[in-house]
Amino acid sequence: MIKKEEHYNDDDIQVLEGLEAVRKRPGMYIGTTSSRGLHHLVWEIVDNAIDEALAGYCDDIEIIINEDNSITIKDDGRGIPTGINSKTGLSTVETVYTVLHAGGKFGGGSYKVSGGLHGVGASVVNALSSFVEVTIYQNEKIFYVRFENGGTTVNSLKEVGKCDKERTGTTVTFKPDPTIFTDTTTFDYEVLKTRVRELAFLNKGLRIILCDDREIEKKKEEFLYEGGLKSYIQYLNKNKNTIHEQIIHLEGIIDNISIEVAMQYNDSYNNLLLSFVNNINTHDGGTHEEGVRNALTRIINNYGKSHKYIKDGEESLTGDDVREGLVLIVSCKHPNPQFEGQTKGRLGNTEVRKISGDIFAEGFDRFLMENPDSAKKILEKCLTASRARLAAKKARELTRRKGGLELTNQWGKLTDCISKDPKESEIFLVEGDSAGGSAKTARNNESQAVLPLRGKILNVEKARLDRALANEEIRTIITAFGTGIGDEFDLEKLRYHKIIIMTDADVDGSHIRTLLLTLFYRFFKPIVEGGHVYAAQPPLYSIKHGKTTKYILSDEELNEYIESLPSNTKFIQNRFKGLGEMNAEDLRDTTMNIQNRVLKQITVDDVVEADKIFEVLMGENVEPRREFIEANATYAQNIDY
Ligand code: 1YM
């Protein structure tokens, strides 16, 4: 753990701007005022408590969603300083909450180790809240301050009581301003829970309690992992078959930069690599991750060669080979991280590459030496992956020779659009030949291509690339997309920026949709991450009365619509059994025409959650699937008719 080197000094506070600026342009400070931004407020306050824990002064944090949708966060740290700040003439806590960019962490003497996306802190939360209350327990005294309407102090800091000497800490309650968060001011317990669990995994020994005190759903859960990252790996591999028992764990500090890695292989064909810097998920990796990746490939190859798993003259294992079935987490703590990229999801500090590589290489090499049985299983797994990769390469070459993966006009099934501009081109993947036929008639042939899918496509959760390539349906999809696959994949070559899955609203339709999503998530992840994948929403009903035809998307909407009709209206209601039943005109008007249609964009907010769901739904083990289906049965509608 990195200790703060100097203590906070009241004069460190820098007075920069007023809170009004935050209210005028909230997006600049918290990214968005949608639900995501709303939850971001919680992390800004929790981060201060986590910093206190990282500095070694706090063990317990509690987060409560109150009945009125306000949030209370408590910690048992030292309490925010209450002395007067000479620059602002205010108490330090008032300065921290009312002056933008104020805080010990910007003062130079000390630094912030945890930190939200923007690291803008408590004053931003105050600016965007209808009220904030801070209570501080310090030196046997209780202090209290209250702000309203975006940061106006209504009760300046004062002593309000006495407490035991042992009782120290900070309690903050805030309520987001509904005039700013116009979409929603309702907190989502599950969203808070996912991040709280992650924070508990990342900060070994820290107890975080999450409570929901709202009427219907009162809940209380405690998150405390003595095993830290090891516990995280256990959690991620829960439904998988691991190939070696012991979780590999190593850590080290060089030049005040700490690196911790935990990893374990399972028998699947996927990998899950998570990386963090100061508790922030670096979705796009960066130098800490690169150091570990490079060292992983190097160390496994060295071990494989010196122990004759890889014979002289045999091809080395590639990065993909050594990552197959691997679940790995890298956590870096850095005093001065530089985040790069559009979403600031990449660590840029160049010195970290060597540091993380060296720490990883030493620890991993030692593990292989000390655990030859595990090492054998890992090497065998990597070698099988390598053989499969070579087989896939052959299969690809073979299909290419047959013209299967080239863009020729003889691939029959696809009805392409005229436009060659990917930005304006879309492809509909349609269930069945008859719906495919209607879609071809209904489409706008300038920008809409149609690919009917005849059979069920292969479940790639249980298959490697070489088997996937043997599947005709999958080959046609790869060819149509134009991107290539595996180590040849190139997002730039994607021929359609909208890929629209159009399946029936029944069990078979959902199955085909899930199979396609599994294929995209496992083999074309950048396409999903780039927001290119959509699900069409064909209507469930049509209602005809007089000359009017109204299409309805859900049972809920149907009831509302029928109730809204004058009571004596005569109407015909004929539920669509499937897309194939709809004529081309209906299909155009409801599902394909850009003016009227409703598309659902498929996004991946949370890779951990997505990985789990695909594994559970499509993987080998039946028991977790049964549990999942039972737990989610209430969400399923229209199971079959
Ligand atoms: C529920 C939220 O804010 N806890 C908290 C915040 C601070 C301290 C302790 C703290 C920090 C330092 C010294 C230091 C903060 N202090 C500041 C500032 N919990 C919560 N607990 N003493 C106490 O950083 O050296 C900002 S946050 F700026 F005043 F030091």
Image (spheres, rainbow, N blue to C red):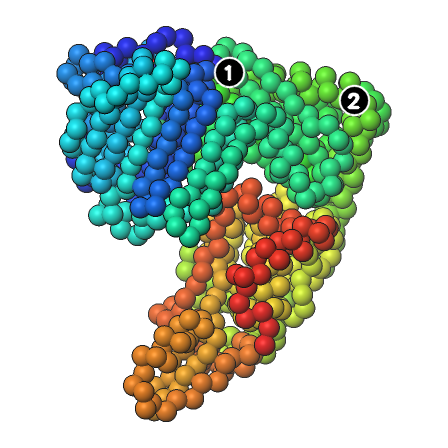
Q: Is residue 397 visible?
A: no
> Would you place residue 122 above or below residue 428 in this image?
above
Residue 464 percent across, percent down from the top left: 72, 48
Using the rendered view, name the quadrant where residue 446 is placed.
Answer: bottom left
Badge 2 is on which residue? 371
Which of the labelled discs sits on residue 640, or is there none? none
| Image quarter of the C terminus | bottom right
Residue 579 percent across, percent down from the top left: 54, 76
> Would you place residue 629 above or below residue 530 in this image?
below
Position of 169 compared to 310: left or right?
A: left
Residue 311 percent across, percent down from the top left: 84, 27
> Would you place residue 72 above or below residue 638 in this image?
above
Position of 83 compared to 294: left or right?
A: left
- Answer whether labels 1 and 2 touch (C-beta < 8 Å): no
**Helix or strand or loop: what does disc 1 sit on?**
loop
Residue 184 percent across, percent down from the top left: 32, 51
Mark 1 or mark 2, which has the lower sequence index? Answer: 1
Q: Residues within 10 Å of mark 2 (few under 14, many from 20)?
A: few
Q: Nearer the viewer, residue 519 or 52?
A: 52
Q: Amino acid at mark 2?
A: Asn
Q: Is residue 486 visible?
A: yes
Q: Residue at x 62, y 30 (%)?
A: 231
User: Is the residue indicated by label 1 positioned so its CB lies within 8 Å of ligand 1?
Assistant: no
Badge 1 is on which residue? 1
**Helix or strand or loop: what does disc 2 sit on?**
loop
Using the rendered view, name the quadrant where residue 478 is placed.
Answer: bottom right
Q: Residues within 10 Å of mark 1 (few under 14, many from 20)?
A: some
Q: Residue at x 65, y 29 (%)?
A: 263
Q: Nearer the viewer, residue 600 or 445?
A: 600
Q: Residue at x 28, y 18 (%)?
A: 162
